[in-house]
Amino acid sequence: MRINIVAVGRLKEKYFADAVAEYAKRMGAYCDFRVIEVPAAPPAKSANEQKETEGAELLTKASGCVIALDGRGKKLSSPALAELIKRRCSAGDSEFSFLIGGSHGLSDGVLARADETVSFGEMTFPHQLFRVMLAEQLYRAMTINAGTPYHK
């Protein structure tokens, strides 16, 4: 199985990059894990134009089952995320691309293309921290599906 996080922008803070790298290393026991970064759109564009430009870039890098991360998506518990991955694998998916938009979110085109749309709740999180949170939840999902004791 391959899991991709496809995100707008680069991790600028070393501690966030280190945290994602740690979860990537741990996930190596369960899947091929990659982080794919696409550039943020120039701020000279309107918010909607930025979302469209970034969304087009995200979709060129996404493959397999596309899961958009958006506040309007379905709120899942950690076991429910693990079940979603397991269910999609049983249906024949072997690659997943989790999409994280830029500061203005995801375009309507990305949301329309997504096979699933998932929310981490109503709160707003810093963009860089969210990537760490997603990596941790994906690792947790892998351990839940493998029956290992990480998730308590």
Image: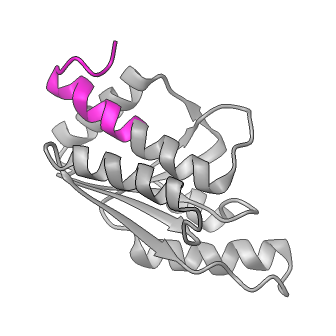
In the image, is residue 147 part of the stretch drawn in magenta? yes
Is residue 89 or residue 34 the one in the foreground?
34
Q: In screen coordinates, is 28 left or right of 63?
A: left
Q: Is residue 24 left or right of residue 38?
A: left
Q: Quadrant of residue 104?
A: bottom right
- Rendered location of residue 97, percent (x, y): 38, 58
Res 139 seen here: yes
Above or below: residue 63 compared with residue 2: below
Q: How many marks?
A: 0
Residue drawn at (51%, 54%), measured in percent from left and top? Answer: 15
Magenta stretch: dominant secondary structure: helix
Q: What is the basis of the colouring in this image? A: one colour
The reply, left or right, for residue 133 in relation to residue 139 is: right
What residue range appears in magenta? 137-152
Picture layout, residue 95 above or below residue 12: above
- How far across and how far down the image is residue 31, in percent? 18, 49
Give the residue drawn at x 58%, y 47%.
130
Q: Is residue 96 magenta?
A: no
Who is closer to the viewer here, 22 or 151? 22
On the question of residue 66 being in view, the answer is no
Question: Vertical placement of 136 versus 35: above or below?
Answer: above
Question: Who is closer to the viewer here, 72 or 32?
Answer: 32
Residue 100 at x, y percent in the picture: 56, 58
Q: Residue furthest top?
A: 152
Q: Position of residue 103 (x, y in %)?
A: 73, 63
Q: Please state, as top left, top right, bottom left or bottom right, where the C terminus lies in the image.
A: top left
Question: Which residue appears at 52% of the width and 52% of the height?
Answer: 131
